[in-house]
Amino acid sequence: MTTLILASAAGAVVGLALGGLGGGGSVLAVPALIYLLGFTPAAATTAGLLIVVITSLTGLVAHAREGKVRWRTGGLFAAAGIVPAAVAGALSVRIPSGVLTAAFAGLAAFAAVRMLRPRSEPASQDPVPAGRAARTGAGLGAVTGFLGVGGGFLAVPALVTVLAVPMTAAVGTSLLVITVNSTAALATRLATPTALDWAAIAPFTAAAVLGAWDGQRLAARASTAALQRIFGAVLLAVAVFMLVDAVV
């Protein structure tokens, strides 16, 4: 019963973040799986990808129904990250748990700072060189595969500042990128036998899916900047805790 309650509560928060912000939820999923549900770092990053794939796909459908997904731009951006995500996902299972936890904590801290200090949408909408877009997509894919995160907290600002996608469409488009990259990374990880606690993953995922729908509706009513700051503060506390745990 305790596992069910913890998994459901954590899943709801992850879903709210993914549905409302297009990112941030996956960075919370991994520490929740490790510290609340007792997963190893390797198992948590694999389970996190599975949860993110299903939840992001749910959020993507919701945003697509409102016409807030740039399919061509998001598809090209995601395509550049497929191979890096798959390769990094295969390599990550060979990394010691302490190193993986410390790396994840550093990335979470970076994500928190980005959320606490959100950038405004650029005025210029000039075409972006394809090479720069491809490099950005490949880098995001590698992060997704290595650390088991969707990378939405990086995808949204990259889509806005690098690919000139309006903020109104960036969240939905980032969910397309997250879904593609996470699926590629998950495919390579599942090829390596990893013990997963489905009794925790199932309610976590179900709650995240429901949370994604609620997050999409919440984003339509609330200030995106305010939501980012709330999740950023939570994420920063989690990052500090993980970093201390990794080095002590």
Image (cartoon, grey):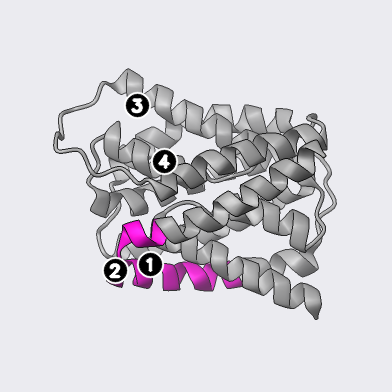
Task: Indicate the position of residue 232 as horizontal and vertical percent values.
Answer: 48, 53
Which residue position holds label 4? 155
Measure the C-alpha gap from mark 2 to mark 4: 20 Å
Measure the C-alpha gap from mark 2 to mark 1: 7 Å
Task: Indicate the position of residue 79 as horizontal and vertical percent values.
Answer: 44, 33
Question: Residue at horizontal 59%, vertical 72%?
Answer: 207
Contact? badges 3 and 2 (CB < 8 Å): no
Which residue position holds label 2? 220
Question: Residue at horizontal 79%, vertical 69%?
Answer: 199
Contact? badges 4 and 3 (CB < 8 Å): no
Query: Which is closer to the viewer, label 3 or label 2?
Result: 2
Contact? badges 1 and 3 (CB < 8 Å): no
Query: Which is closer to the viewer, label 4 or label 3?
Result: 4
Mark 3 or mark 1, which is nearer the start of the sequence? 3
Disc 4 residue type?
Ala
Q: Quadrant of the C terminus?
A: top right
Question: Residue at horizontal 55%, vertical 28%?
Answer: 83
Which residue position holds label 1? 216
Disc 3 residue type?
Ala
Q: Residues within 10 Å of mark 3 (few under 14, many from 20)?
A: some
Mark 1 or mark 4, which is nearer the start of the sequence? 4
Q: Residues within 10 Å of mark 1 (few under 14, many from 20)?
A: many
Looking at the image, is 201 positioned above or below residue 194?
Answer: below
